[in-house]
Image (cartoon, grey):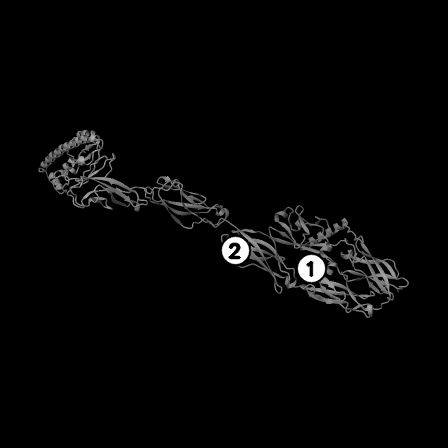
Amino acid sequence: MAPLQRRPLRSEQVLLLTLLGTLWGAAAAQIRYSIPEELEKGSFVGNIAKDLELEPRELAGHGVRIVFRGRTQLFSLNPRSGSLVTAGRIDREELCAQSPRCLVSFNILVEDKLNLYPVEVEIVDINDNTPQFLKEELEVKILENAAPSSRFPLMEVYDPDVGINSLQGFKLSGNSHFSVDVQSEGHGPKYPELVLEGTLDREGEAVYHLVLTAMDGGDPVRSSVARILVTVVDVNDNAPVFTQPVYHVSVPENLPVGTPVLAVNATDQDEGVHGEVTYYFVKITEKISQIFCLNVLTGEISTSANLDYEESRFYELGVEARDQPGLRDRAKVLITILDVNDNVPEVVVTSGSRTIAESAPPGTVIALFQVFDRDSGLNGLVTCSIPRSLPFELEKTVSNYYRLVTNAALDREEVSLYNITVTATDKGTPPLSTETIISLNVADTNDNPPTFPHSSYSVYVLENNPRGASIFSVNALDPDMDQNARVSYSLAEDTLQGAPLSSYVSINSDTGILYTLRSFDYEQLRDLQLWVTASDSGDPPLSSNVSLSLLFVLDQNDNAPEILYPAIPTDGSTGVELAPRSAEPGYLVTKVVAVDRDSGQNAWLSYRLLKASEPGLFAVGLHTGEVRTARALLDRDALKQSLVVAVQDHGQPPLSATVTLTVAVADSIPEILADLGSLEPSDGSHNSDLTLYLVVAVAVVSCVFLAFVIVLLALRLRRWHKSRRLQALGGGLASMPGSHFVGVDGVRAFLQTYSHEVSLTADSRKSHLIFPQPNYADTLISQESCEKSESLLTTQDLLETKGDPRRLQVSFFP
């Protein structure tokens, strides 16, 4: 027979139940509601906004939501009306089975305040289930000698509804031999029994067809029918009898599958086939039949699936013993499941943040979570803990809820990520525990300025560096992150030698690399002091400074030695130094004076004789540059000696300069003048006569000039005898050294202020003789005569002897 369809409640019933539920929820200290089952999705349950003393529109702003422990969300919040509504159809029988009251508990969480409000909703049963027979057809065998009032168990009838809506009675189709009676066990199922009203006569009627109707007390009444076939059996006067009507046994929930639970036993006083007893389960549900199995021959009951205390704590089994003719007896087996600590505690994080600012004060709530254990008793008592080394602590609230809060200041630079291990441990034996990790990121705040590894830096740079070259790199570290750790570099404003510092060096704001904007010259700039500022990009930005000693410009050997003496004529002529033939070894002929604009090792100079026309005749001091005779001069030595002196510094690579000296070997000026023609060989026969005429002219002019000087000197000597001033001057002249060039004593005073420069070339048109103007105050030579003499010259080279009247410079053009 097909099951009857469920009928919906009438509107008056729904309204009455809803009103009663609302009044009940308002009167209770806890928020309670009552609704009938099988309401449509979205049906009104209660005004949760009013009970929370909030306006409906404030629910979303406060983050009000339902925290439901069950697997299925049964209710939801209507944000517009502020009411609690059903999330779907609710079946009371599926939710609470045969329990007299069906209560659904959950919590309402106000997110912004982290407050919990317990809510309890009672699901009221409606008559939506029809009584159902486990079997729609049943055959009952009755001995023909059965006594009147004998009772015969019929099939079990099950109605999931409770109260008045549950099974209320049975009706048997009209028959004078049988009636039906009900055996009830409190709130449990009801078992109909067939009662024999009179004696049977198998020979008169062997089979009876009966119809049994089961009815509940709902409005309207629901019912179902089963067909019963009664067969009258020949006499078998002894039925099996169980040793006890009820069997009790307690087993732990961790009993292995296949383990025997107990064995029932029934005896039959008959013999033969009438005494053979077999056992069968009766009055059990399909779920129970999957958990336990019964040995038909031995009556042993064993497990066929795992037991779970948390799913069912008690089982009631019906066992029937039958003999071959069909006589039977029934007994009950009551199995109690004992709890074993086999469930680890569970931690459910209800709400919280995964990020916290490092500036958050102690006491900041991070997360809200619930712990529970499906076991019971001590096995279900749970405690929570976290490591004490962390700056956090747990605060217990209601219904096994805990809050995770900070108890100290946080520092992201020390710890940027916390993996907080929440350990939940029950009090079972042995105790079970579970660990849940709550990861918490510490958000950065700009609380650290950039720092340099050193307080100051010294940078050495070679001069003549190319423009735009990188010379140094600074790096500042900021332990913050992201924008707060993004460092930019800049130079402090300053001036150097009247120019802004930014025209000398620049810095890359992102990398901290310093670049030169000009080529440095050691001779102009030797050091530079500047400040580098490192700033982060936080809000507000933080910064720090570092001193940079830049630049200790290192000198490069970029200047060759510069020869100061003898001065190199600008017209390409060669200077001449004089040495008497009577000079002894070590005689100072002249001294090469040179300087180097570089410094340090690059300015250390050394002198050496690079080339000589007469090797071994002259030597040059390595460090002094003095040119001295290395041996005595011989008659065979040529009048003209050409020397090339090299001056070299000690840089890398070394730079050098050379000067060519011409030393004339003679004992007197006339000898020099007589032999001037031999100083420079003629370039050709066509100009030899012209050179000879020039030499004669020079000799004549020199003699005239010498005679003039002698006359002038004689006049001065005459006046010397008449004044003290001339006597003092005469004493000064007596202290002067003798001349190596001429033998006349009076010429010494003259040579203190005069020097001759004679230039000869192979081409007589380029030869000239210079007589510079003396610096005596009372000299009678007129300026006009000097000007006339200068008009005949193309070059003048005056050498001031500065106290050495023996030195005469003669330059020749090559």
The amino acid sitting under disc 2 is Ala
Q: Is residue 333 in view?
A: yes
Q: Residue furthest right?
A: 204
Q: Pinpoint residue 676: horizontal percent, then vertical percent.
A: 17, 35
Q: Pinpoint residue 108: horizontal percent, then vertical percent.
A: 64, 52
Residue 491 vs 767, above or below: the answer is below
Q: For residue 736, what is the image quadrant?
A: top left
Give whichever of 383, 140 is nearer the camera: 140
Residue in the image at 64% along x and 46% along y: 57
Question: Left of 284 or right of it: where is 111?
Answer: left
Residue 310 vs 64, above or below: the answer is below
Q: Is residue 561 in view?
A: no
Give whichever of 611, 129 is nearer the camera: 611
- In the image, which is nearer the foreground, mark 2 or mark 1? 1
Give whichever of 741, 387 is nearer the camera: 741
- Bin the neighbour count of mark 1 within 10 Å (Cα to Cα): few under 14, some 14-19, many 20 and up: few
- Bin the neighbour count of mark 2 within 10 Å (Cα to Cα): few under 14, some 14-19, many 20 and up: some
**On the rendered image, what quadrant is the C terminus found in?**
top left
**On the rendered image, what quadrant is the N terminus found in?**
bottom right
Q: Residue furthest front?
A: 685
The amino acid sitting under disc 1 is Glu
Give whichever of 117, 688 is nearer the camera: 688
Residue 38 vs 283, above or below: the answer is above
Q: For residue 670, what is the image quadrant?
A: top left
Question: Left of 159 or right of it: where is 346?
Answer: left
- Disc 1 is placed on an element classified as loop
Q: CA distance from mark 2 to mark 1?
A: 44 Å
Label placed on residue 408: 2
- Disc 2 is placed on an element classified as loop
Label placed on residue 311: 1
Q: Pinpoint residue 61: horizontal percent, then vertical percent.
A: 61, 47
